[in-house]
Amino acid sequence: MSKIKITQVKSGIDRMERQKRTLKALGLRKMHHSVEVEGTPQIMGMVKAVHHLVKVEQA
């Protein structure tokens, strides 16, 4: 699997609880915080659920 860099670009405030928990599960804590993770199908599914809140790049 390849590494991907996920950056939170929009706030999780006033979002559904499920989306807030997904951001936390991805390891994102605050705005403009980035994490590098493996691009597994599980991670890609979580990214798809919050695609409007994050930016994804190849690492």
Image (cartoon, rainbow, N blue to C red):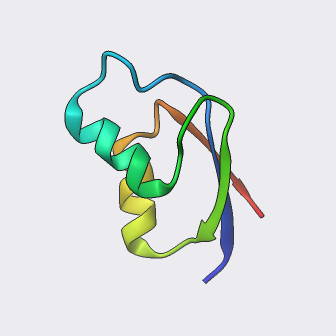
Taking depth in this image into account, of 59 and 11 the one nearest to the observer is 11
**What quarter of the picture does the C terminus occupy?**
bottom right
4 vs 30: above or below: below
What residue is rendered at 61% in x and 28% in y?
31
Residue 30 is left or right of residue 42, and the answer is right
Number of numbered markers = 0
Residue 12 is left or right of residue 2, and the answer is left
Taking depth in this image into account, of 23 and 4 the one nearest to the observer is 23
* Residue located farthest toward the top when viewing the structure as drawn: 14
What residue is rendered at 30% in x and 38% in y?
19
**What quarter of the picture does the N terminus occupy?**
bottom right
* Residue located farthest toward the bottom when viewing the structure as drawn: 1
Q: Position of residue 36 (x, y in %)?
A: 67, 63
* Residue located farthest toward the right when viewing the structure as drawn: 59
* Residue located farthest toward the left when viewing the structure as drawn: 17
What residue is rendered at 41% in x and 73% in y?
41
What residue is rendered at 55% in x and 71% in y?
39
Q: Position of residue 33 (x, y in %)?
A: 66, 40
Q: Position of residue 4 (x, y in %)?
A: 66, 63
Quadrant of residue 42 in the image?
Answer: bottom left
Residue 3 is left or right of residue 24, and the answer is right
